[in-house]
Image: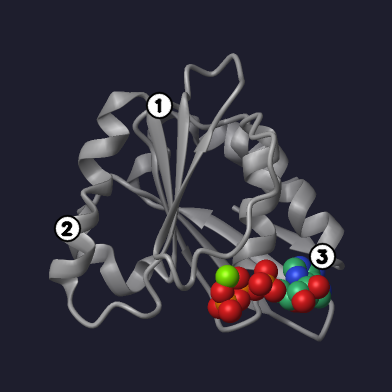
Amino acid sequence: MTRVSEAADSTELAGEQFATLLRPGDVVLLSGPLGAGKTTFVRGLARGLGVRERATSPTFTMVREHRCHNDLGVTTLHHADVYRVRSLDEVVDLALGELVEEGAVAVVEWGELAAAVFGEDVVTVNIEVVTEESRRIEVGGAGVGDRAEAFARWAS
Ligand SMILES: Nc1ncnc2c1ncn2[C@@H]1O[C@H](COP(=O)(O)OP(=O)(O)OP(=O)(O)O)[C@@H](O)[C@H]1O
Ligand SMILES: [Mg+2]
């Protein structure tokens, strides 16, 4: 399920619309090179979950927590960036997998580096840089489950 974005704004919109398909307990692993647009996507995703403040890059804090206001049952967004982790133990210590059991969603930038911590039941979002302004945003992962049709609509 791939959606093309030709500008930062449309990546943000893709994230915002993606958010409406999320459920409490979802773990979303974002991958893509430096400057691909992972944080841009999460900024839209946060808006879609009804986060009132602007989501900024958690690169140095590793994880930021946002209160959500939506009808999806998602109360909290945990936005992590594991680019700087030196060992998977640090990711385990963040306990994101446990936090999502309390009505939260976790979104992890550079999530592929920590995929082993989260197991199979994750939604993956890969952002491929095509040109300076163009991106291919691909959604997959076992966590999509019975939402494949909805994500296909999101992509089209
Ligand atoms: N179609 C696009 N989608 C997203 N960002 C775009 C697009 N076109 C240009 N950009 C620019 O690319 C940059 C993306 O930055 P962003 O911080 O979102 O990337 P990132 O993947 O989170 O990087 P990092 O790996 O450093 O965390 C922004 O400067 C944005 O304006
Ligand atoms: Mg980022």
The residue singled out by tag 3 in the image is: 8
Q: Nearer the viewer, residue 129 or 48?
A: 48
Question: How far is the residue under mark 3 from the one under mark 1?
Answer: 27 Å
The residue singled out by tag 1 in the image is: 24
Classed neighbour count for the residue bearing mark 2: other residues with Cα under 10 Å, few (<14), some (14–19), many (≥20): few
Task: Locate the C terminus and report the quarter of the image it occupies.
Answer: top right
Secondary structure found at label 1: loop
Q: Nearer the viewer, residue 127 or 87?
A: 87
Q: Which residue is painted at 45% across and 27% down in the image?
A: 23
Direction left: furthest residue: 89
The yes-or-no answer for disc 3 within 8 Å of ligand 1 is: yes
Q: Which residue is painted at 45% across and 73% down in the image?
A: 60
Secondary structure found at label 3: helix
Q: Quadrant of residue 25?
A: top left
Q: Amino acid at mark 3?
A: Ala
Numbered label attached to residue 93: 2
Q: Are marks 1 and 2 in contact (CB under 8 Å)?
A: no
Question: How many numbered markers are drawn?
Answer: 3
Q: Amino acid at mark 1?
A: Pro
First of labels 3, 1 by sequence position: 3
Q: Position of residue 102 (x, y in %)?
A: 29, 25
Secondary structure found at label 2: helix
First of labels 1, 2 by sequence position: 1
Q: Which residue is painted at 76% across and 53% down in the image?
A: 12
Relative to residue 91, is residue 65 drawn left or right?
right
Q: Give the vertical position of 30 relative to 45 (above or below).
A: below
Q: Give the vertical position of 22 relative to 39 (above or below).
A: above
Q: Position of residue 2 (x, y in %)?
A: 64, 58
Question: How far is the residue under mark 1 from the one under mark 2?
Answer: 21 Å
Q: Amino acid at mark 2?
A: Asp
Classed neighbour count for the residue bearing mark 3: other residues with Cα under 10 Å, few (<14), some (14–19), many (≥20): some
